[in-house]
Image (spheres, helix red, strand yellow):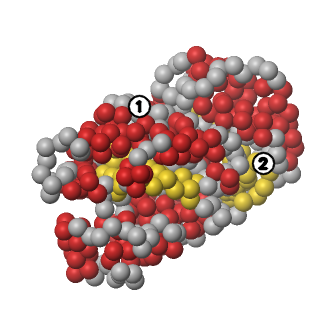
């Protein structure tokens, strides 16, 4: 029902300090921690969420907890577990409702089920959490359990909600009606944007942006030969890759000249690297807009039949491939809809003509080794010319921050979180709507034909992530919220 996780995060503040462009960030963080730490002395902090791997929260907790510990905070990580599939179906329904989607009917025993599982999770958490501790509960799954502990014990409890929508709909109202009785028991709450705070928590919430860790396996630099090795080992580059065509051959030569590229295989094995790649990496969730993205890409390819560009001009469009990658849904326990969502993507893919299928790869990434999975995501994002996040709803897409850090040109939807991350025409492009397949096709076409803009977007995006969305700002913000809540 709850399991203590040893964060498998190995970078320390000294490692970041050694990197020239990060050393100032570490110094600022140390300075602030020195001021705030006395208030946290003797208080144990427990972060609780519902999965150790897969999804944004599991991604951002290890560096956050490791750096808090290194600065002197007794921070720990607990994962709640439940073998009640129905419970995770219910919390997934609530997750979708907070995003304004899905069936708002939460009767039919939903309250009783949520309460029952919350009681048993609370009992298990109570084996770890003691009076005077600080409990930080992430998202709706363990919300009830945390509220029950707060009632029973003299501790400080903070609820961190990572999801949200910037409007009120019948769906969001149903979700907040359901969660309110639990959420109001907390001493404080944290959201990603002011617009996401529900009425019932107005005046009791702080804002923290999620962050990424520049030294994690997911985000660290990869020299091109390592990148190719990771893709090859992961089975993502095959010997049947297409022969190099002039512009891409040039790119290969440029890399070889710069010493960045030491090919372990024949150049034609690296076909994937030398065709323009458009990628989306996400969980298999309908709200990630997989199917309309594929349809938009197909429209872009189909428009080539009637387009008037010369053969050379249109080459990037002819060669472009779409890579859709997500975690093997069998191994993600808190997301019961993953398999169905992947099936829908596959059904769309299988309905396409063979030449279109050749231009699209749907990849279910193995999760057996989290490190290998992270390296594969890293390599895929790095070899992409464009990274898309076509979410119908998104509180804040870590995948976008990850790709921005790697200087990919980003195409996002109008989902509320993405609008906060991507400054249109500065860091990337926003399509009109995640379902607007014409606009997706148009935007991809324009960007694939415009390397200059792609480069400029990538540069600006990386700078923005450095300034606002790296782990240092995240740790600083948590130190502030923890100490302010204890005041
Ligand atoms: N992710 C991963 N492996 C995959 C697919 C996704 O590690 O096969 C990661 C991805 O890199 C990102 C996180 O899962 O760090 C997804 O977070 P995001 O905020 O984009 O979406 P969420 O899953 O929280 O809705």
Badge count:
2
Q: Where is residue 321 in the image (x, y as percent from the top left)?
A: 36, 55
344 lies left or right of 298: right
Q: Is residue 377 visible in this depiction of the protein?
A: yes
Residue 444 place in picture, x, y as percent: 29, 44
> Of helix, strand and loop, which one carries label 1?
loop
- Give the class, few, some or many, for how many residues have Cα within 10 Å of label 1's Cα (few <14, many ≥20): many
Q: In this view, does 445 lie above or below 236?
A: above
Q: Earlier in the sequence, mark 2 or mark 1?
A: 2
Q: Which of marks 2 and 1 is in front?
A: 1
Asked where in the image residue 112 lies, by quadrant, the reply is top right
- Measuring from the top left, give residue 307's x and y in whole percent: 18, 42
User: Which residue occupies 35% across, 44% down?
Assistant: 297
Report which residue position mark 1 lands on.
435
Q: Residue at x 56, y 63 (%)?
A: 373
153, 436: nearer the viewer: 436
Give the CA separation, mark 2 to mark 1: 35 Å
Nearest to the observer: residue 65 or residue 239: 239
> Is label 2 within 8 A of ligand 1 (CB to nearest ligand atom)?
no
Give the answer, above or below, for where 201 lies relative to 91: above
Is residue 350 found left or right of 466 in the rendered image? right
Q: Please give the residue where the numbered disc 2 appears in the rendered image.
A: 81
Question: Are the residues flagged by discs 2 and 1 in contact, CB closer than 8 Å?
Answer: no
Q: Which residue is drawn at 14% across and 57% down?
A: 312
> Element at badge 2?
loop
Q: Residue 3 bears which disc, if any?
A: none
Residue 261 horizontal side relative to residue 30, left or right: left
> For the residue carrying disc 2, how many other residues have a C-alpha within 10 Å: few (<14), some (14-19), or many (20+)?
many
Q: Position of residue 302 (x, y in %)?
A: 29, 42
């Amino acid at each position: 029902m709850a399991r203590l996780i040893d964060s498998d995060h190995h970078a320390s503040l000294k490692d970041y300090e050694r990197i020239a462009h990060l050393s100032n960030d570490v110094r600022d963080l140390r300075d602030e921690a020195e001021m705030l730490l006395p208030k946290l002395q003797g208080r144990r902090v427990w972060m609780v969420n519902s999965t150790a791997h897969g999804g944004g929260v599991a991604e951002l907790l290890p560096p956050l907890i490791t750096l808090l510990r290194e600065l002197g905070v007794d921070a720990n990580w607990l994962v709640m577990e439940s073998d009640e599939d129905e419970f995770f179906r219910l919390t997934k329904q609530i997750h979708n409702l907070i995003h304004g989607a899905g069936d708002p009917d939460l009767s039919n025993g939903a309250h009783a089920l949520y309460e029952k599982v919350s009681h048993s999770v609370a009992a298990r958490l109570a084996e770890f959490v003691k009076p005077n501790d600080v409990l930080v509960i992430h998202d709706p799954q363990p919300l009830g359990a945390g509220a029950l502990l707060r009632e029973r014990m003299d501790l400080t409890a903070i609820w961190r909600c990572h999801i949200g929508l910037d409007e009120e709909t019948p769906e969001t109202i149903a979700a907040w009606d359901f969660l309110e009785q639990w959420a109001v028991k907390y001493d404080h709450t944290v959201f990603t944007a002011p617009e996401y705070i529900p009425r019932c928590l107005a005046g009791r919430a702080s804002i923290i942006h999620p962050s990424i860790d520049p030294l994690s396996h997911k985000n660290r630099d990869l020299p091109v030969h390592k990148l190719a090795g990771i893709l090859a080992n992961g089975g993502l580059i095959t010997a049947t890759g297409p022969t190099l065509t002039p512009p891409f051959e040039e790119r290969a030569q440029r890399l070889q000249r710069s010493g960045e590229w030491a090919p372990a295989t024949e150049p034609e094995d690296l076909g994937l690297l030398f065709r323009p790649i458009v990628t989306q990496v996400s969980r298999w969730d309908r709200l990630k807009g997989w199917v309309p993205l594929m349809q938009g890409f197909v429209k872009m390819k189909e428009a080539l039949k009637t387009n008037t560009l010369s053969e050379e001009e249109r080459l990037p469009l002819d060669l472009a491939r779409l890579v859709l990658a997500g975690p093997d849904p069998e191994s993600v326990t808190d997301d019961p809809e993953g398999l169905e969502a992947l099936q829908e993507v596959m059904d769309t893919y299988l309905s396409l003509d063979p030449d279109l299928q050749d231009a699209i790869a749907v990849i279910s990434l193995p999760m057996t080794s989290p490190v290998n999975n992270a390296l594969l995501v890293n390599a895929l994002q790095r070899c992409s010319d464009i990274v898309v996040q076509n979410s119908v709803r998104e509180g804040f897409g870590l995948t976008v921050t990850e790709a921005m850090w790697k200087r990919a040109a980003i195409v996002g939807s109008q989902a509320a979180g993405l609008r906060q991350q991507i400054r249109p025409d500065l860091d990337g492009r926003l399509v009109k709507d995640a379902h607007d397949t014409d606009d997706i096709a148009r935007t991809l076409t324009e960007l694939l034909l415009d390397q200059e803009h792609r480069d400029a977007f990538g540069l600006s995006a990386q700078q923005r992530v450095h300034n606002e969305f790296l782990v240092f700002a995240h740790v600083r913000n948590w130190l502030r919220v923890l100490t302010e809540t204890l005041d």
